[in-house]
Amino acid sequence: MRVFGRLSCDFNAVQNDQISACEGEIVQIIDIKDGYATIKKESNQSGKIPNYFLEMVECSEENQNHTIDKIPHCNEQYCDNNRELVKEGIENDYANSEDDYLRDIPFVPKLVTFSAVVPSEGLLFPSSQPYIIQDLIDCSFRIGDPIEIHAHIGSQYDFALKWNFPNKNRDDAIISAPSDKGHISLFLSHSTIDDRGKYTVTLANEHGKISSSCWIHVVTQPSIPLNLKRAVDPSKPKAIRLKWTPPMDKGGSRLLWYTVQYIRDGLTEFQEVIHGIKQCCIRISHVQNTNYSFRVFAFNEYFKSEPSESVTIDANELESMLEQAKIIELEKKLNVELLKKSFAECFSIEHKIGKGRTGICRQLTCKISGKQFVGKFFPQHAADYDKISREIRILSQIRYSNIPHYFGTAVSKDDEIVVITDKIYGQPILNYICNCGYLSEAMMQKFAFDLISAISFIHVRGIAHLGIKPEELLIETTSNLPKLILIDFGSAEEFEGSNAMNTTNLSIWQGGAVEFLAPEQLAHKPCCKSDVWSVGVLLFVLATGISPFEDLDGSDEVSRRRILEGEIADCNEKFRDYSPQLLQLIAQIFVVDHKERISSIDCLHHKWINEVQSDTFSMVDHIEEYCEKRRDRMRSSFLLHEI
């Protein structure tokens, strides 16, 4: 494909290798180099002319031997007060030409040429190519208003000037010729939406070219704000929140703000709540006990939108809405669905059963069925929501005969979180044994089997209890055969990995009694086998009445050291009344390295658990003495459960 050009004005050759040509003459472009185009006229004469005297005209191969129709060009203009009306528009018809060398042409089609202008306030040492003293500036215009943009330019040599703007169909663009001081402007009457976009002025001479651009915003009326919704503010009893989304159409503006209005009983017109806010939400306080309607307007620089759809609020219902909002917020924090019915409607709160590190356990009675439950109450002002959520999540996925069944979670009228489980009719293991007045190895075996079965069940599911001690082991006596129940999963942790038994979590020990804690718990890296260590401590206490790592002087620091080093109290004499397998099991449990310690599943297969043990009863004086010492140690401790 050959490339043709049309002269934008007359050119007179001043050098030997140049050629003269007339305005509107169609020529073939042979080559372009160093700001000059080598052309060939219809008379087959060839020579050079400056690039900026040419407009590109493309001709297909099949028409290349025919005369090209003349195209109206940029000299069809008139001058009035230094303005030129360019009837042709100023689009670049060949910006997407596939001929790579066309990109080297330092100007674009339909240029207007002007004489040199060097403003006194311009550059101190201006370059040979055109230069811009003041760039075009982004502007906003009201739709229908005229658009006028300005630039300040200069050039030591004759130059071509071209404006590009979005609306290619406009034929009324008025371009001012440069003033003596180098001021230029573009004027478009009666702006439309199609006039939005990027505006560029390009200057070119034989030494190079330069451009300046700006964005013009033609502003129309914004559309209405969307999705106006109301909600109560949990932090304020007589306050509401309004929230909406921005309008689909901002009216072409970069700026947008809102006004909120209301009307209530007793008013005939809407009143303004607030004006000029940029965010899409607001809190309104001091709401009276009456009906309200709210609406929102959007504003830009020039226009106001139509009102949004109104939302109505009955302030008399704020209290119930507030309660519902608190429930929704709490459900998000706990990641749990609370019981649908009101806690006060379903349950009566009775006596306290026990007190733990973070909550108080009370007996509950269902008003509908009369069934008794246990409620663990957590005050919200001091609640660790992540920890409570974990306990609820763990309880909800455990269904085992030696673990209380989880019933649900509710909120009391005092805004306390209540975790509800089945009530266990029994007492702590040491109290039970002391009340019986006797203990046999077979009883120890039965209780150990129940406990190890329970922790094996949770261990294979990646859960560790991490709080096993006598107060958390209840002996249920509703049947002829006593059954041990493991309660209180407030310290439980979840573990991941293919080998959950040996996987550890970083968990900061919060202090308290260390008697039943494993070495890795004191090192802040508990695991599932930490529960097995606690089982070993319990068996040692039941057999001897002595805590295996207790310091005789009552020093917790010494006890911690003995646990970390695995230094066990010498009680061989007391174990002579029991089978050797019991001592063997305890020895396999008290291994400081948890990876080498026996697991709960292996404990279930141990000989002492599976073989028949002696049912000979022995007195429990040693247990009673231990209970008295433990009660004295814990009397001032926050871990004391008041049973």
Image (cartoon, rainbow, N blue to C red):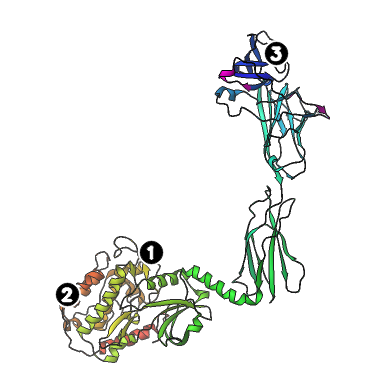
Say which label, 2 or 3, has the lower sequence index.
3
- Are circles 2 and 1 on residues that touch, CB within 8 Å? no
User: In the rendered structure, which amino acid carries the disc numbered 2?
Assistant: Lys
* Residue type marked 1: Leu
Amino acid at the residue labelled 3: Ala
**Magenta stretch contains residue 223:** no
Picture coordinates of residue 378, whole percent (x, y) = 47, 77
Which of the image's four quarters has the N terminus? top right
Magenta segment main secondary structure: loop
Residues under numbered marks 2 and 3 in contact, where contact means CB atoms less than 8 Å apart: no
- Tell me, yes or no, whether the highlighted magenta stretch contains residue 59: yes
Tell me the tag on residue 506: 1
Residue 153 higher or lower than 479, as above or below: above
The answer to whether residue 624 is left or right of residue 157 is left
Q: Residue 104 at x, y = what percent?
A: 59, 23
**Residue under the point 71% across and 44% down:** 218
- What's the residue at 26%, 90% (across, down)? 621
Please report the bounds of the magenta region as a residue range: 57-80
**Count of numbered tags:** 3
**Quadrant of the rendered image containing residue 397:** bottom left
